[in-house]
Amino acid sequence: MRCAMNEVLTRKLQMFWVSVWIYNIALTCTKISLLIQYMRLFAVSSARIVCWIVITATVIFGLFSVFGNIFLCTPVERWWNKSIPGHCLDEASVWLSNSGEHMIIYRKKRKSLETSSRTTRALCGCTPGFAGQVVLILTT
């Protein structure tokens, strides 16, 4: 009975491991989608250049996040079986680096809006998007 429970637990931890890097892929695609939307919002060429720079950084960081979570532990099996000899990266550091990138994107958007010549009504229309970004920063 105990052996069967260990196998079930191991299988669930393996599925959770896969879900973590699939989550990071989806999160990166969402960020890129939002940045492309901001390129439509800000027609000024300097803002578009900044968007492309942030998109490039997001892709690079997204690849780091995905591969960093896949290979968080060496050997990979140590992620779900701590009895295997090896080592893992500090999970808190990985989490904080993910949150840091969210804050950089939020700050860039906020600064762009403050300097834009949009009407008050248009700026109020952007508020739900920014509120969603704050929720994203706080929950990830």
Image (cartoon, rainbow, N blue to C red):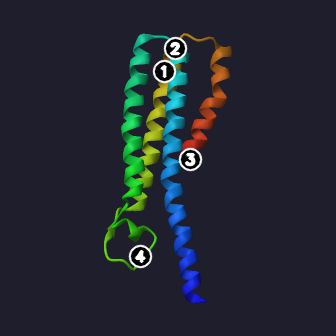
Q: Nearer the viewer, mark 4 or mark 2?
A: 4
Q: Quadrant of residue 130?
A: top right
Q: Residues within 10 Å of mark 2 (few under 14, many from 20)?
A: some
Q: Which residue is mark 1?
A: 112
Q: CA distance from mark 1 to mark 3?
A: 21 Å
Q: How far is disc 3 from disc 2 in space, using C-alphas? A: 26 Å
Give the residue at mark 2.
116
Whichever of callouts 4 and 2 sits on the residue coming sooner in the sequence is 4
Amino acid type of the residue tagged 3 in the rendering:
Leu
Quarter the N terminus occupies: bottom right
Instruction: Give the percent coordinates (x, y) of residue 27.
Output: 52, 42
State the residue position of label 3. Answer: 138
Between 35 and 79, the one nearer to me in the picture:
79
Write the residue at 63% across / 24% down: 126
Q: Earlier in the sequence, mark 3 or mark 2?
A: 2
**SS for dot 4:** loop
* N-term mark: 4 or 1: 4
The amino acid type of the residue labelled 2 equals Ser
Residue 30 drawn at (x, y percent)? 54, 36
Vertical comparison of 124 with 133: above or below: above
Q: On the rendered structure, is 2 left or right of 72?
A: right
